[in-house]
Amino acid sequence: MKNAMRILFSVLLVAGVAACAKKAVKPTASSDTTPTADTSATNNDGRYKVGDLDTDSCLRQRVVYFDLDRTEIKPEFSAQISCHAEYLRQFPNARVTLEGHADERGTREYNLGLGERRGNAVQSAISSAGASGGQLNVVSYGEERPVDRGHDESAWSKNRRVEIVYTSAN
């Protein structure tokens, strides 16, 4: 069963990388010689630039959400994880803190542990995608830092998350 899960994760990871792959666009011949701003997310060689953390649509996605009492990463976040792993591979001096969170249900101790397990799950996924484990730090806030203070499923679903926080970009 674990081998099947690893194979499934690998397939999803490869699909995610392919989805975030940058495609080179050939410039068209134009008589206009006005300089234009570079709006591409990568250099000509397909690599990220430091400034891409704030401009690349994939890298700007920095929250991974979880189901109730779960630590499994949903498939819809595999492309996002792949993008961050690729960035970290290209910038070995970059550092990330993975902040694990939980909703208000459960004891404080349980939620701190759950936040840590979620952070560890994202750390494992990013490391499996090629980032160095030394670039990643996990911290759990449990239920202490909710983004939505409501007391219903809508609020709780926003609070069950891991935030990817860059502490050093390069």
Image (cartoon, grey):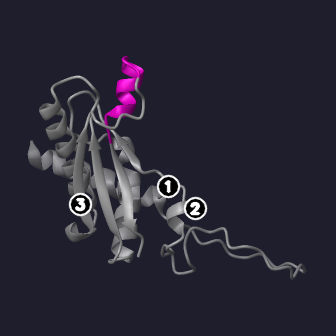
- Asked if residue 21 lies left or right of residue 156, the reply is right
Which quadrant of the view contains residue 42? bottom right
Q: Is residue 151 above or below residue 62?
A: above
Report, in whole angstroms, how far the alpha carbon at label 3 lies from the one at label 2: 24 Å
- Counting other residues with Cα less than 10 Å from the Cα at mark 1, is it few (<14), some (14-19), or many (20 or more)? some
Report, in whole angstroms, how far the alpha carbon at label 2 lies from the one at label 1: 7 Å
Residue under numbered circle 2: 55
Tell whether label 3 touches label 1 (CB within 8 Å): no
Residue under numbered circle 3: 137
Q: Nearer the viewer, residue 139 or 69?
A: 139
Element carrying mark 2: helix
Element carrying mark 1: loop
- Counting other residues with Cα less than 10 Å from the Cα at mark 2, is it few (<14), some (14-19), or many (20 or more)? some
Tell whether label 2 touches label 3 (CB within 8 Å): no
Residue found at x 22% / y 40%? 72
Residue found at x 27% / y 33%? 143
Quadrant into which the N terminus falls = top left
Residue found at x 25% / y 42%? 141
Report, in whole angstroms, how far the alpha carbon at label 1 lies from the one at label 3: 19 Å
Residue under numbered circle 1: 60
**Residue type for callout 3:** Asn
Q: Is residue 158 magenta?
A: yes
Q: Position of residue 119 (x, y in %)?
A: 23, 48
Magenta stretch in the rendered image:
150-161
Does label 1 or label 3 sit earlier along the sequence? Answer: 1
Quadrant into which the C terminus falls = bottom left
Q: Is residue 118 magenta?
A: no
Does label 3 or label 2 sit earlier along the sequence? Answer: 2
Q: Nearer the viewer, mark 3 or mark 2?
A: 3
**Residue type for callout 1:** Arg
Residue found at x 26% / y 69%? 135
